[in-house]
Protein backbone atom coordinates (compact mmCIF):
# COMPACT_ATOMS: atom_id res chain seq x y z
CA UNK A 1 0.00 0.00 0.00
CA UNK A 2 1.47 3.35 -1.05
CA UNK A 3 1.47 6.18 1.46
CA UNK A 4 0.52 9.08 -0.80
CA UNK A 5 0.81 11.85 1.81
CA UNK A 6 4.51 12.46 1.24
CA UNK A 7 4.14 12.32 -2.53
CA UNK A 8 1.22 14.75 -2.52
CA UNK A 9 3.43 17.11 -0.49
CA UNK A 10 6.05 16.87 -3.24
CA UNK A 11 3.46 17.75 -5.86
CA UNK A 12 2.21 20.71 -3.79
CA UNK A 13 5.80 21.95 -3.51
CA UNK A 14 5.95 21.74 -7.31
CA UNK A 15 2.69 23.70 -7.49
CA UNK A 16 4.30 26.51 -5.47
CA UNK A 17 7.27 26.59 -7.85
CA UNK A 18 4.90 26.67 -10.84
CA UNK A 19 2.91 29.50 -9.27
CA UNK A 20 6.08 31.47 -8.51
CA UNK A 21 7.36 30.94 -12.04
CA UNK A 22 4.03 31.96 -13.58
CA UNK A 23 3.77 35.17 -11.54
CA UNK A 24 7.36 36.26 -12.19
CA UNK A 25 7.25 35.40 -15.89
CA UNK A 26 3.90 37.17 -16.26
CA UNK A 27 5.30 40.35 -14.72
CA UNK A 28 8.25 40.25 -17.15
CA UNK A 29 5.87 39.51 -20.04
CA UNK A 30 3.63 42.49 -19.23
CA UNK A 31 6.62 44.82 -18.98
CA UNK A 32 8.08 43.62 -22.28
CA UNK A 33 4.66 43.68 -23.97
CA UNK A 34 4.12 47.34 -23.16
CA UNK A 35 7.72 48.37 -23.86
CA UNK A 36 7.81 46.60 -27.24
CA UNK A 37 4.19 47.37 -28.11
CA UNK A 38 4.59 51.10 -27.48
CA UNK A 39 7.93 51.05 -29.28
CA UNK A 40 6.20 49.58 -32.33
CA UNK A 41 4.09 52.71 -32.66
CA UNK A 42 7.00 55.07 -32.02
CA UNK A 43 7.73 57.75 -34.59
CA UNK A 44 11.44 56.87 -34.44
CA UNK A 45 12.53 54.14 -36.85
CA UNK A 46 15.42 52.69 -34.77
CA UNK A 47 13.05 52.13 -31.81
CA UNK A 48 10.47 50.49 -34.07
CA UNK A 49 13.16 48.32 -35.66
CA UNK A 50 14.49 47.09 -32.31
CA UNK A 51 10.99 46.27 -31.09
CA UNK A 52 10.18 44.44 -34.32
CA UNK A 53 13.41 42.42 -34.12
CA UNK A 54 12.60 41.36 -30.55
CA UNK A 55 9.02 40.41 -31.41
CA UNK A 56 9.85 38.47 -34.56
CA UNK A 57 12.76 36.62 -32.94
CA UNK A 58 10.86 35.41 -29.89
CA UNK A 59 7.69 34.61 -31.85
CA UNK A 60 9.66 32.88 -34.59
CA UNK A 61 11.75 30.54 -32.44
CA UNK A 62 10.73 27.72 -30.11
CA UNK A 63 10.40 28.44 -26.39
CA UNK A 64 12.23 25.13 -25.83
CA UNK A 65 15.26 26.44 -27.71
CA UNK A 66 15.04 29.80 -25.93
CA UNK A 67 15.00 28.00 -22.56
CA UNK A 68 18.00 25.86 -23.47
CA UNK A 69 19.89 28.92 -24.67
CA UNK A 70 19.15 30.77 -21.44
CA UNK A 71 20.28 27.88 -19.25
CA UNK A 72 22.93 26.01 -21.23
CA UNK A 73 24.41 28.47 -23.76
CA UNK A 74 24.54 31.81 -21.91
CA UNK A 75 27.05 30.44 -19.36
CA UNK A 76 29.58 30.26 -22.21
CA UNK A 77 29.18 34.06 -22.46
CA UNK A 78 29.71 34.42 -18.72
CA UNK A 79 26.02 34.75 -17.85
CA UNK A 80 25.04 32.13 -15.27
CA UNK A 81 21.30 31.74 -14.61
CA UNK A 82 19.59 29.53 -12.09
CA UNK A 83 16.87 27.21 -13.46
CA UNK A 84 14.22 29.60 -12.09
CA UNK A 85 15.89 32.66 -13.66
CA UNK A 86 16.26 30.86 -17.00
CA UNK A 87 12.61 29.77 -16.92
CA UNK A 88 11.34 33.24 -16.04
CA UNK A 89 13.50 34.83 -18.76
CA UNK A 90 12.52 32.43 -21.54
CA UNK A 91 8.82 32.28 -20.73
CA UNK A 92 8.49 35.99 -19.95
CA UNK A 93 10.31 37.18 -23.07
CA UNK A 94 8.40 34.72 -25.26
CA UNK A 95 4.97 35.70 -23.91
CA UNK A 96 5.95 39.38 -23.98
CA UNK A 97 6.60 39.18 -27.72
CA UNK A 98 3.06 37.96 -28.33
CA UNK A 99 1.67 40.49 -25.87
CA UNK A 100 3.47 43.32 -27.64
CA UNK A 101 1.37 42.81 -30.76
CA UNK A 102 -1.75 42.83 -28.60
CA UNK A 103 -0.72 46.19 -27.13
CA UNK A 104 0.07 47.63 -30.55
CA UNK A 105 -3.24 46.44 -31.98
CA UNK A 106 -5.23 47.86 -29.06
CA UNK A 107 -3.55 51.24 -29.38
CA UNK A 108 -4.24 51.31 -33.11
CA UNK A 109 -7.87 50.41 -32.44
CA UNK A 110 -8.54 53.60 -30.47
CA UNK A 111 -10.71 55.86 -32.62
CA UNK A 112 -9.29 58.77 -34.59
CA UNK A 113 -11.69 61.11 -32.81
CA UNK A 114 -9.87 60.43 -29.53
CA UNK A 115 -6.54 61.38 -31.07
CA UNK A 116 -8.04 64.51 -32.59
CA UNK A 117 -9.44 65.44 -29.18
CA UNK A 118 -5.93 65.14 -27.73
CA UNK A 119 -4.62 67.50 -30.39
CA UNK A 120 -7.46 69.92 -29.67
CA UNK A 121 -6.52 69.85 -25.98
CA UNK A 122 -2.91 70.56 -26.92
CA UNK A 123 -1.68 67.35 -25.31
CA UNK A 124 1.77 66.11 -26.22
CA UNK A 125 2.14 62.61 -27.70
CA UNK A 126 3.28 61.16 -24.37
CA UNK A 127 0.47 62.90 -22.47
CA UNK A 128 -2.11 61.64 -24.95
CA UNK A 129 -0.79 58.10 -24.59
CA UNK A 130 -0.68 58.22 -20.80
CA UNK A 131 -4.00 59.94 -20.11
CA UNK A 132 -6.24 59.04 -23.06
CA UNK A 133 -5.03 56.27 -25.40
CA UNK A 134 -3.60 53.68 -23.00
CA UNK A 135 -6.49 53.86 -20.46
CA UNK A 136 -8.90 53.09 -23.28
CA UNK A 137 -6.66 50.39 -24.74
CA UNK A 138 -6.35 48.47 -21.44
CA UNK A 139 -9.85 46.88 -21.59
CA UNK A 140 -9.09 45.74 -25.15
CA UNK A 141 -5.79 44.24 -24.02
CA UNK A 142 -6.92 42.38 -20.91
CA UNK A 143 -8.94 39.48 -22.43
CA UNK A 144 -6.04 38.44 -24.65
CA UNK A 145 -3.56 38.98 -21.83
CA UNK A 146 -5.66 36.58 -19.76
CA UNK A 147 -5.34 33.94 -22.48
CA UNK A 148 -1.60 34.55 -22.70
CA UNK A 149 -1.27 34.16 -18.93
CA UNK A 150 -3.03 30.79 -19.09
CA UNK A 151 -0.80 29.72 -21.99
CA UNK A 152 2.23 30.83 -19.97
CA UNK A 153 1.02 28.78 -17.00
CA UNK A 154 0.75 25.67 -19.17
CA UNK A 155 4.09 26.47 -20.77
CA UNK A 156 5.85 26.33 -17.41
CA UNK A 157 5.95 22.55 -17.83
CA UNK A 158 8.97 22.99 -20.14
CA UNK A 159 11.17 24.00 -17.20
CA UNK A 160 11.10 20.39 -16.01
CA UNK A 161 13.59 19.81 -18.84
CA UNK A 162 16.21 21.84 -16.95
CA UNK A 163 15.43 20.09 -13.65
CA UNK A 164 13.39 22.87 -12.07
CA UNK A 165 11.11 21.19 -9.54
CA UNK A 166 7.80 22.42 -10.92
CA UNK A 167 4.52 20.50 -11.05
CA UNK A 168 5.46 18.38 -14.04
CA UNK A 169 8.92 17.56 -12.70
CA UNK A 170 7.54 16.49 -9.33
CA UNK A 171 4.85 14.36 -11.02
CA UNK A 172 7.59 12.58 -12.95
CA UNK A 173 9.50 12.00 -9.69
CA UNK A 174 6.41 10.55 -8.03
CA UNK A 175 5.69 8.32 -11.02
CA UNK A 176 9.27 7.01 -10.99
CA UNK A 177 9.16 6.25 -7.26
CA UNK A 178 5.67 4.72 -7.10
CA UNK A 179 5.16 3.28 -10.56
CA UNK A 180 1.79 5.01 -10.68
CA UNK A 181 0.92 7.38 -13.52
CA UNK A 182 -2.75 8.04 -12.85
CA UNK A 183 -2.47 9.63 -9.39
CA UNK A 184 0.43 12.09 -9.92
CA UNK A 185 -0.58 13.19 -13.40
CA UNK A 186 -4.26 13.26 -12.53
CA UNK A 187 -3.41 15.46 -9.55
CA UNK A 188 -1.33 17.95 -11.53
CA UNK A 189 -4.02 18.03 -14.25
CA UNK A 190 -6.50 19.20 -11.64
CA UNK A 191 -4.04 21.72 -10.15
CA UNK A 192 -3.25 23.22 -13.58
CA UNK A 193 -6.99 23.51 -14.27
CA UNK A 194 -7.69 25.25 -10.95
CA UNK A 195 -4.79 27.67 -11.50
CA UNK A 196 -6.03 28.48 -15.01
CA UNK A 197 -9.54 29.00 -13.65
CA UNK A 198 -8.20 31.41 -11.02
CA UNK A 199 -6.36 33.37 -13.72
CA UNK A 200 -9.51 33.51 -15.85
CA UNK A 201 -11.71 34.84 -13.03
CA UNK A 202 -8.97 37.20 -11.86
CA UNK A 203 -8.60 38.74 -15.31
CA UNK A 204 -12.37 39.17 -15.62
CA UNK A 205 -12.38 41.03 -12.30
CA UNK A 206 -9.50 43.26 -13.42
CA UNK A 207 -11.25 43.87 -16.75
CA UNK A 208 -14.39 44.96 -14.92
CA UNK A 209 -12.40 47.38 -12.78
CA UNK A 210 -10.54 48.75 -15.80
CA UNK A 211 -13.70 49.56 -17.73
CA UNK A 212 -15.19 51.69 -14.95
CA UNK A 213 -15.21 55.36 -15.83
CA UNK A 214 -14.26 54.87 -19.48
CA UNK A 215 -17.76 55.51 -20.78
CA UNK A 216 -17.46 59.13 -19.75
CA UNK A 217 -14.07 59.40 -21.40
CA UNK A 218 -15.44 58.17 -24.72
CA UNK A 219 -18.44 60.49 -24.81
Image (cartoon, rainbow, N blue to C red):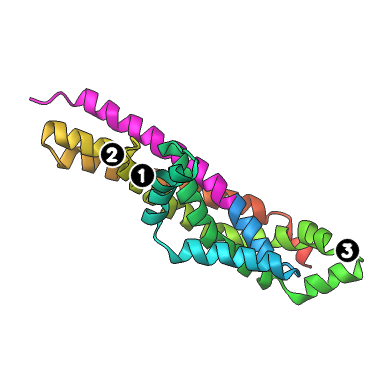
Q: Earlier in the sequence, mark 3 or mark 1?
A: 3
CB contact under 8 Å: marks 2 and 1: yes
Q: Give the residue at the far bottom of this rendering.
A: 112
| Residue 115 location, quadrant | bottom right
Left or right side of 135 for 116: right
Q: Give the residue at the far left of this rendering.
A: 1
- Give coordinates of residue 165: x percent, y percent: 33, 35
Give 196 or 15, whichever is nearer the viewer.
15
Residue beneath label 1, please? 159
Q: Name the mark nearer the viewer: 3 or 2.
A: 2
| Local secondary structure at mark 3 | loop
Residue beneath label 2, please? 169
Q: Earlier in the sequence, mark 2 or mark 1?
A: 1
Residue placed at 34% from the left, 46% from the top?
157
Disc 2 crowd rating (10 Å Cα; few below 14, some 14-19, many 20+) is many
Give 68 or 113, whichever is nearer the viewer.
68
18 versus 68 height, above or below: above
Question: Over which residues does the magenta segment extend?
Answer: 1-30
Residue beneath label 3, please? 123
Residue placed at 50% from the left, 45% from the top?
25
| Local secondary structure at mark 1 | helix
- Give coordinates of residue 53: x percent, y percent: 57, 66
Q: CA distance from mark 3 to mark 2?
A: 52 Å
Amino acid sequence: MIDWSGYITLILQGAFVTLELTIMASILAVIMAFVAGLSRVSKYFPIRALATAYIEFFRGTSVFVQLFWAYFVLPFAGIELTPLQAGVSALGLNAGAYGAEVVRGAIKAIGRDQREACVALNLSRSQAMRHVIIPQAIPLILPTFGNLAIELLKGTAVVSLISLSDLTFQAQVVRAQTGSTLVPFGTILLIYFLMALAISYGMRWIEGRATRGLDGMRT
